[in-house]
Image (cartoon, helix red, strand yellow):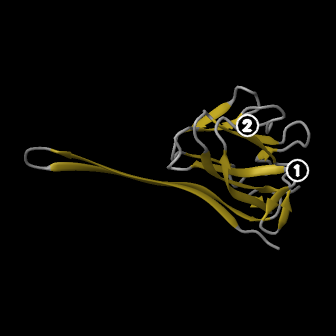
Amino acid sequence: MALKSKALVNVEAKQTRSQDLSSDTGSLVKSYGTTFADGTGAGQADAVFSDQRTLAASANETLDLAGTLAGTFGNVSFARVKAIIVKAADGNTNDVLVGGGTNALSTWVADATDIVRLRPGATLCLVAGSADATGYAVTGGTGDLLRVANSGAGSTVTYDVIVIGASA
């Protein structure tokens, strides 16, 4: 089974300023991203995990990236992460907190206080470059956990998570 994957961020912004006899327009169009071929080296990935998850009020969960996450074609275990995308649902009332905890993914949000707060509708996208063979190292038992939490009481939060990486 071969994996071809791509992680992209596209930005388009157009700003107009009107004056008495004319208007000025400034446009920004920029795309960032990496295409991964099948494999475990630089610019390559051979494993993907994706899911939509819901957390109860004030709850948290830990995704074991070196464990047995249920992927489309069976269990997935990462040695290196090449991309992480977390999207908080637009309809959330509370924030989705990503990171922190113990045995956290050791090269990113490794400390218990390293937390990214995703407001309702927000997206976190972290992608390794195509020349990077390592990405974000996963160390089973000491640096392999991705913690996600609901920021408060009173309501559930829903989020999408996608992890692309290498099994070796």
Q: Quadrant of residue 33?
A: bottom right
Q: What quarter of the picture does the C terminus occupy?
A: bottom right
- 41 relative position to 155: left or right: right
Q: Which residue shows up at 73% across the image and 52% down it?
A: 82
* Residue receiving disc 1: 67
Q: Quadrant of residue 50?
A: bottom right
71 is higher (above) or lower (below) than 22 = below
94 is higher (above) or lower (below) than 40 = above
Mark 1 secondary-structure assignment: loop
Q: Which three-letter amino acid code belongs to the residue tagged 1?
A: Gly
Q: Which three-letter amino acid code belongs to the residue tagged 2?
A: Trp
For marks 1 and 2, the one nearer the N-term is 1
Mark 1 or mark 2, which is nearer to you? 1
The picture places residue 97, in percent across and down from the top left corner, at 64, 37
The picture places residue 15, in percent across and down from the top left corner, at 29, 48
* Residue receiving disc 2: 108
Between residue 160 and residue 15, name the one nearer to us. 160
The picture places residue 5, in percent across and down from the top left corner, at 69, 65
168 is higher (above) or lower (below) than 96 = below
Between residue 109 and residue 68, name the one nearer to us. 68
Q: What quarter of the picture does the N terminus occupy?
A: bottom right
The picture places residue 101, in percent across and down from the top left corner, at 77, 32
Query: How far is the residue under mark 1 from the one under mark 2?
Result: 18 Å
Q: Which residue shows up at 58% across the image and 57% down it?
A: 8
Instruction: Check whether the beta carbons of the residues at disc 1 and disc 2 lie within 8 A of each other.
Output: no
Work out whether residue 51 can be spotted: yes
